[in-house]
Amino acid sequence: MNSTITQEISSQILRGVSSQRELQTHGISYQVVIKRPGDSGETPMIGDKVYVHYTGRLLNGKKFDSSHDRGEPFTFNLGIGQMIKAWDLAVASMSKGEVCEITCKPEYTYGVSWNPPKIPPNSTLVFELTEDGGIVRRIKQKGEGYASPNEGAVVDVHLEGSCAGHVFDSRDLRFIVGEAEDHDIPLGVDRAMKRMEKGECCLLYLSPRYGFGTEGHSHFGIGPNADLIYEVLLKEFVKVKNTWDMTMVEKLELAVAAKQKGTQYFKAGKYIQAVIQYQKIVPCLEIEENHSEEHQASVKALVLSSLLNLAMCHLRLQEYSHAVEKCNKVIEVDNSNEKALYRRGKAWLQMNEFYLAKSDFERVLEINTENKAAQAQISICLQKIREHHEREKQTYANMFQKFADQDTKIENVSTAKKNKQN
């Protein structure tokens, strides 16, 4: 990355965070609107590995890409030209946890001559970016080559964990990527493994969400909501076979094992880890479209159950739009699936879509008249709808009263003027 762009990024950081930023480079400006401020004023440094969630839309509102659809944040090295200019500049000015919307002209995105699929040439684009901030990775020693562990790979590492300057964990160990929780290793270390190279040594700064969360870790003496720092050396790894190289029998074995592991994590209240396991199943089995009759029933059952389990995890994680999305996929295949309709109704209810929720719960009762939970949820929906109507009525009443008071005030002023003239 040239020094001019580096200076531009540095200047954006110094401007700080406000409700709206106007960023400039080469004399052309683009707008950043802060939808939610970050947790602190600290911004990433050039060269940092940053994790962001994003949704990209055209000016007409049509979505063309989203990391949320894939269930994992997107990661890149800041300020070295890996991403479009708009991202390098905008993310450099963001703090951890910030959500912003950037509107950028073609000069900052893909230009006139080339565009990814779904994006017309010379398009102005709108991105909603979330500085995930849960994991910040700073490389102390670069690794060898370009290969990294994949999900399920066996890795040999040395790690050292610290909290508030106190080292609480230091060891050499071997574990499976995606199952680090079994070895008292936090989620952030597990997720970072997929970005590391053999021989790499890095520092990982983990927020509580990617550390030991609200519960902490009593064995290590870590309290709730603690920020952690891990130094990790990836000594060796062995990748597992890619799913497209597997036989159908191997894919089914992988899916069954992932389901069992996901259920184990779910029962332990480790919902993010459960999501990681359940998410292995659908892509693994959907790669091969023409299943034999022998495997068709098993594949359908595993795919539908994994989607339903993912929906339940998203409900527990309060990721309601993701829960709706997973239920929709089930309902596309089986429009009378009681669990999918019920869980989608629960998600709609939490999103204040009371009529949609009520409709789903009523459909559940059509399928199973004995479903008392759905009956109870319909009562809740009706109560919420009544409360909503009351609030609307009160709002309009206050509005009309305000107008009436204004009219009275105007009449009083007019009367006073007439009396004065007389």
Image (cartoon, rainbow, N blue to C red):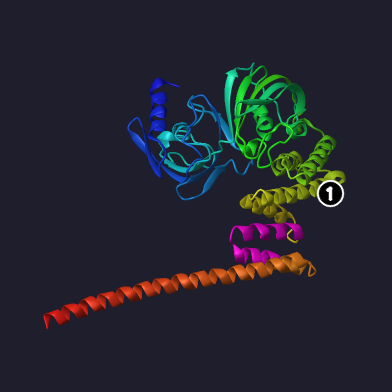
* Residue depicted at 64% across the width and 41% down the height: 71
Tell me the magenta residue range: 338-361
The quadrant in which residue 209 appears is: top right
Q: Picture quarter containing residue 85?
A: top left
As drawn, the residue found furthest toward the bottom would be 422
**Residue found at the far right of this picture:** 294
Residue 245 higher or lower than 311, as above or below: above
Quarter occupied by the N terminus? top left
**Amino acid under disc 1:** Ala
Residue 39 shown left or right of residue 308 in the figure: left
Residue 72's place in the image compared with 77, above or below, is: below
397 w.r.t. 353: above or below:
below
Please provide percent x and percent y for residue 199. Answer: 66, 16
Asked if residue 343 is among those painted magenta in the image, a careful observer would answer yes
Query: Is residue 112 visible in the rendered structure shown here?
Result: no
Pick the quarter of the image with the C terminus: bottom left
Q: Main secondary structure of the magenta part?
A: helix
Residue shown at 57% from the left, 42% from the top: 66
- At x 42%, y 21%, the residue is 2
Say which residue label 1 marks. 297
Q: Secondary structure at mark 1?
A: helix
Residue 223 in picture, x, y percent from top left: 66, 37
Residue 219 drawn at (x, y percent): 74, 33
In percent of width and height, residue 359 lies at: 66, 66
Q: Is residue 202 magenta?
A: no
In the rendered view, does 7 fall on the left or right side of 156? left
